[in-house]
Amino acid sequence: MLPEVVEAMNEAAKAFVDMEELHRRAGEIIAEITGAEAAYVTSGAAAALVLAAAACMTGNNPEKMAQIPYTEGFKNEIILPLMHDNVYARNLTIPGVKLVKVGTKNGYSPEDVERAITDKTAALAFVFFTSRRGCDMEALKKMVKISKKHNIPLIVDAAAELPPIENLTGIVATGADLVAYSGGKDIRGPNDTGFIIGRKDLIEAIAAHGCPHHYVGRPMKVSKEQIVGLVVALQHYTPEAVQARRKTWERTVQYFVRELPSDGVKVERVMPNPAKHEYSAQGWPKARVTFDENRLGITAAEVNRLLRNGDPPIYAPQSGNQITLNPQCLQEGEEKIIVERLKQILQQAKNVGIEGNA
């Protein structure tokens, strides 16, 4: 988190506030930042999906709200393309929703979605991925058309789709009714926060479900410190700030590319290619380290294990004979620790090999 975020949270901790008023004011600020009608701070993007599903079933009707999760007689079905299905989609079912999955794991058509619509349909759901075919902006716009045609709300899960920063305003601008984001990750707010933006009447219903009220959102309380921290983080999440961080990441990757290569170790800068539908929401450079395992006498998996078990532990994704070094989560100077540790591990493996051949 930014120092400004931590400082704001510390200041909030000293104050007593009206939580409903704080939620309202935070929502107004976030709505202004994102270009949405309204917004609400949640305890993570998963909680945002729970509350969104509940709001689409009950609206602002207290009698229906009190019945959740017993939704017999409600419009209680949400249509989700099967290719969008993942472990987070089950959050939509927590308030008593039945998920109706359409299409196949490889794709779906607008006709698949429309055929599934009945008088029990409470909402459509869409899991947004910036550059994955069937989950991208083009596909979202098609789903928005269906939503508007049938007057059914559309819930979008965009939890991890920042960067690019354009997604902060661009997704809701398509006409999607509710869009959920994580407040941590690239925004660098409190990691246990999220927020949901969109249609004012639905956001009001979400707020009615939430704490301090006694409905499905009551266990999903967000503290005043979290709310203030998230708002300040979003106020600092600007194109200029994102670009400055990208330059820092680029320098870090170039350091890896310059310092790590050796006999048996190849290092290259890699970036996702949206034109090839590679996942580009995490659109920053990384360093991919490839090990010649036979020459080095150690596998990438063993290198990875030693990195994790060291002090400090260093975690890097490993696949086959490669590990990937991601600059996003590094503090200044930590790239030098990584390089030093990798060189130590490889030198130790070399020494063992020499002793074994002696």
Image: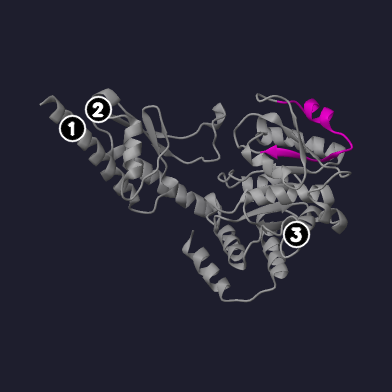
Looking at the image, is mark 2 or mark 3 nearer the viewer?
A: 2
- Which structural element holds mark 1? helix
Q: Residue at x 83, y 27 (%)?
A: 115
Q: Which residue is mark 2?
A: 297
Query: Where residue 140 appears, x then y in whole percent?
Result: 71, 36
Q: Which residue is mark 3?
A: 207
Q: Residue at x 33, y 44 (%)?
A: 309
- Name the colouring of the figure: one colour
Q: Does label 3 or label 1 sit earlier along the sequence?
A: 3
Query: For the residue marked with disc 1, what is the amino acid?
Result: Val
What span is in magenta?
108-127
From the viewer's side, name the closer residue of 194 and 221: 221
Query: Where residue 129 appears, x then y in whole percent?
Result: 61, 37
Query: For the residue marked with disc 3, what is the amino acid?
Result: Ala
258 drawn magenta: no
Query: Cβ–Cβ below 8 Å for labels 1 and 2?
Result: yes
Q: Is residue 66 left or right of residue 156?
A: right
Q: In the figure, residue 209 lies in which quadrant?
A: bottom right
From the viewer's side, name the closer residue of 111 and 173: 111
Q: Which residue is mark 1?
A: 352
Question: Mark 3 packing: few (<14 Cα in 10 Å), some, or many (20+)?
Answer: many
Q: Residue at x 81, y 35 (%)?
A: 146
- Which structural element holds mark 3? helix
Q: Is residue 348 left or right of residue 336?
A: left
